[in-house]
Image (cartoon, rainbow, N blue to C red):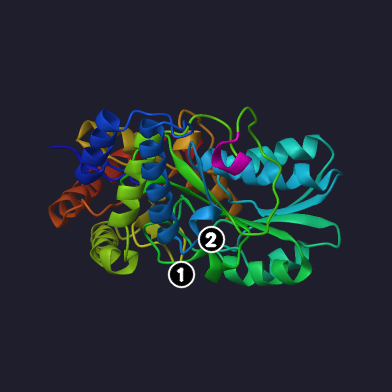
Amino acid sequence: MRIYLDNNATTQIHPDVLARMGEVSLNVYGNASSVHSEGQHARRILEEARERVATLIGASPREIVFTSGGTESNNAAIHGVVLSTRSSCHIVTTSIEHPSVLEPIRELALRGHEISLVPPDPDGRVSQERIIEAIRDDTKLVCVMLANNETGMIQPVRAVAELCRIRGIHMHCDAVQAAGKLEFTAEDLGVDTLAISAHKLHGPKGIGALFVRTGISLERHMGGGAQERRRRAGTENVPLAAGFAAAAELAAGASAQMRPVEALRDRLEELVRRKLRHALINGSGLRIPNTSNLRFPGADGESLVIALDLAGVAVSTGSACSSGRTEPSHVLLEMGLSEQDAKSSIRISLSRFTTSEEIERVAELLEEMVPTTMRMTTPRDSVS
């Protein structure tokens, strides 16, 4: 039996979600934009799904745009804001954002827009004061994630959004890693747009949502039809929307549901630090309850991930969007870690399916494997 602890990359689909998707796939086959009975049946299922996803983040159904996932939601918000300005502008974001935020913003820089990247403090949290200091008179967009995908550190979205609202600056939040793990509402955060994704909360891959606050105007990023109130063209995927809705319902009451997960995460860290006294945790302070970024100075994180995989355990060295690369985590480097320290780190992310027996087993394996990967490190690799 394998142990899956890479839930920040993607989660196991919940059986209830899969059952709902199968039911809808079989019985609701009409195009939701068609006027006949089959089409209207599909439309009802789609709008019911929109209501449930909206409820998850305390939004109105009319504020929810279904997308293909978090990456599209982030891109749609960023490009939608900048395109609507009709001129070059200034953008502020943090240097620890997900690539689906950093890459489109860097592309915009190549087109003449100015960018300010705000680094985190050594604890992995970006200071709200530093973000606010970076805002200028010509700033049109500020992007701050709610929870970092590698360290789990919670960022000061609400405080930054409050200033942005006062100054008339669009505030976008990547909440992909927070949805289903933290209880929040879009209104309480005060953001203008917000991205979430179904497969991070035991839903299907291939569908996400972009919250667009009432009154906010975005240039559409995909033309060709009037779907999603002309915000995103294309035939709506009703079975995936139904699966997303089922996952959103299961994720309700995240605080209570995640307490056992947080207890297991804390137990894992306690065991690891007891067995391997040199082990460190990257990121300190408020974190989402399922995430632990562990550093074993002198060890090789990639070798450790491979060894654990061979032993039946799935973990990672960082964002799945960066897999296959040999470079160390940009998040850890921005926190001030050396390349070697960043490469000696692994990310372990739990889910509601994680058990105490699995945690005990992983701690035992780490005790056995970390010293081995330290012996495998060459003197040249050890230089920071």
* Residue in view at x 40 percent, y 64 percent: 182
Q: Nearer the viewer, residue 374 or 236?
A: 236
Q: Do residues under tags 1 and 2 come within 8 Å of each other at their CB atoms?
A: yes
Q: Residue furthest front?
A: 36
Quarter-of-image position of residue 134: bottom right
**Image quarter of residue 42:** top left
Q: Main secondary structure of the magenta part?
A: helix
Q: Amino acid at mark 1?
A: Gly
Say whether residue 88 is magenta: no
Count the marks: how many?
A: 2
Q: Amino acid at mark 2?
A: Gly
Query: Looking at the rendering, in which quadrant would you find the C terminus?
Result: top right
Residue 132 % position (x, y): 73, 67
Residue range corresponding to the magenta coloring = 226-230
Tag 1, which secondary structure? loop
Q: Is residue 134 above or below residue 53?
A: below
Q: Nearer the viewer, residue 229 or 54?
A: 229
Q: Position of residue 220 (x, y in %)?
A: 67, 39
* Label 2 SS: loop
Crowd around label 1: few <14 · some 14–19 · many ≥20 (10 Å): few
Q: Position of residue 117 (x, y in %)?
A: 71, 52
Left/right placement of residue 176 relative to residue 193 reads: left
**Crowd band around label 2 with a 10 angstrom C-alpha radius: few (<14), some (14–19), many (20+):** many
Measured in 3D between alpha carbons, the distance from the residue under mark 1 to the one under mark 2, in whole angstroms, is 9 Å
**Viewer-side residue, 238 vs 156:** 238
Q: Is residue 350 visible?
A: yes
Residue at the spot of label 1:
285
Viewed as shown, does residue 48 lie left or right of 220?
left
The residue where tag 2 is placed is 124
